[in-house]
Amino acid sequence: MKKLLLAALILVTFTALGPTQVSAVTNNLVKVGLRYGSTAMSSANLENAEGAGYEFGYFDANRNFVLLGRTDITTITMHAGSVSESAAGTHYMGEAESYAYRTTAPQPGQTECYATFTEAAEAAAAQGGWPAWINGRYTVRSSAYAQTTEYSSTSVVVTKTGTTQILFEYDSGGARALGVQPAGNSTWFRGYKYAGGFEYPRASGGNLSVINVVSLEDYVKGIVPYEMLGSWPLAALEAQAVCARTFVCGHTKHLSSQGFDVCATQDCQVYYGQGSGSNGPTSTSNQAVDNTAGLCIYYNGTIVQNAVYHSFDGGATEDGANVWGTETGYLKGKLDPYESQTNVPNYSYTVTYTPAELSWILDQKGHSVGTVQDAYVSEYTPLGNVYKVTFVGTSGTETVTGETCRTIFYSSTYNKSVTSMRFRINGKGADSWGASGISTTGGLLSSLNGAAAITGSGAVETVWGDAASAITASGVAPVTSGTAVPAPVTSSGNNSGNFVITGTGSGHNVGMSQYGAKAMAELGYDFRDILEFYYTDITIN
């Protein structure tokens, strides 16, 4: 979820969160979009990892599974059932794999209706066909029918994987998607095991979306070890579990547009279910979920909608308003003294852009200033994070604010990016890290009391007391009397003609730092301490 990272809410009472609280999770079940849109599939396989067989049906408005039929076969494939005239006689399984299964299409209507799936299955066996649920009735489809008609554009056909054996056909005219429930609580899909059932919406005439319908706690167990390492300290994993649960309960990001609550990528939260082999949940990560079962983060008595987190902040988190433009009471930035007390890979970074590269990147993103002549940080927040970046070009000057200061530098073409909100640019403009620097005459402080400090906004203030902290390019460093103090970082001018960006951190700098959580856990803090540090004025229940 490092990018978030909002859609319509379905609000229901979730008793685990307290009788007066509400949640976007319906009937304690989460719908997770595994494949949809451009990644929708012409065919999708399942294989039992536990038990044998599957139930066919659909999920009603309350996400209760309505049973229509079943099979004992352990490997099944769902297909978008449409067959074009030019491909009559061939059913495509996708990925250049196809097979012939009939020479004439099935009867468009029902020649006979049956009261139960068993009756339809027995009749289908006698006729050499397959049972079907068409517009609310059981019937039989068979290749013996003489009429030449295609499948409906909303039909889904289930086969035994790798064969021409059709097990079931489902078509509700698009009113309800086909649902499949495994016999056990573990099923393989695309190399990963998943708990729960599956749903296969099909846009009219299009491919199948694949949605995992899973219990809330199983969903969280499929998040924690992919957003953090499952070997991290228990308290950090518990904090992550509470964040993950809060995120999905707080809002349903894709419900109105795609029919599921959250996706399975960083756009929401990274989710791979029960994992694959040794890559997946650990006993510690599962324990973290069990230990915090039902717990979410609340602000002013309401579950928070943005329990956001990032990899590491590089010295200070940031107000959500300064990054995304919306004031959020629980997303307030603060100096982070913890990250520097644990090992953080790639804590600092340097990336260089030529004027031509930066000009092209800006032009592609609709910021046409001509050939870039200068780029510099024109305003820092009081915490030393970037708030404004100004670009000066042959065709004009433009300033961007908030998270755009970071994302505007991303380019897949050049494989370059700025990874955090905490950086400086070695350009021509006046530019500093924005951190406090303590005035000294020889690099040593005989006493902090009465020393002058330059704040991130450029104001000069007086330090009172015998201890303080200074933000450096490496993070927050404690300063006491008699210690050496690093000089403030300032621009040295763009002598090379290129733009060199150096910084610390990874992510949007808002909410919980995951490496900061790890550091706090290693120092003996519990998950409540961690969450109450990174989120302001919250309760956890």
Image: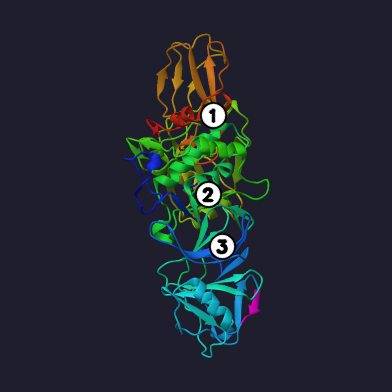
Q: Which is in the foreground here, disc 3 or disc 1?
A: 3
Asked if the magenta segment contains residue 168, the reply would be: no
Distance in Å between CA atoms under marks 1 and 2: 33 Å
Vertically, is 6 above or below 118? above
Image coords of residue 515 (percent x, y): 56, 34
Left or right of 84 in this view: 534: left
Circle 3: residue type: Tyr
At x 51% / y 31%, what residue is drawn?
A: 433
Would you name the residue on which mark 1 appears? 489
Circle 1: residue type: Val
Dot 2: element: loop
Whichever of labels 1 and 2 marks the residue nearer the N terminus, that label is 2
Would you name the residue on which mark 2 appears? 266
Whether residue 399 can be seen here: no
Looking at the picture, tell me which residue is in the foreground, 347 or 471. Answer: 347
Asked if the magenta segment contains residue 100, the reply would be: yes
Image coords of residue 258 (percent x, y): 44, 60
At x 46% / y 41%, what residue is drawn?
A: 308
Residue 250: image quadrant is: top left
Looking at the picture, tell me which residue is in the foreground, 180 or 525. Answer: 180
Q: Which residues are magenta?
A: 97-101
Circle 2: residue type: Gln
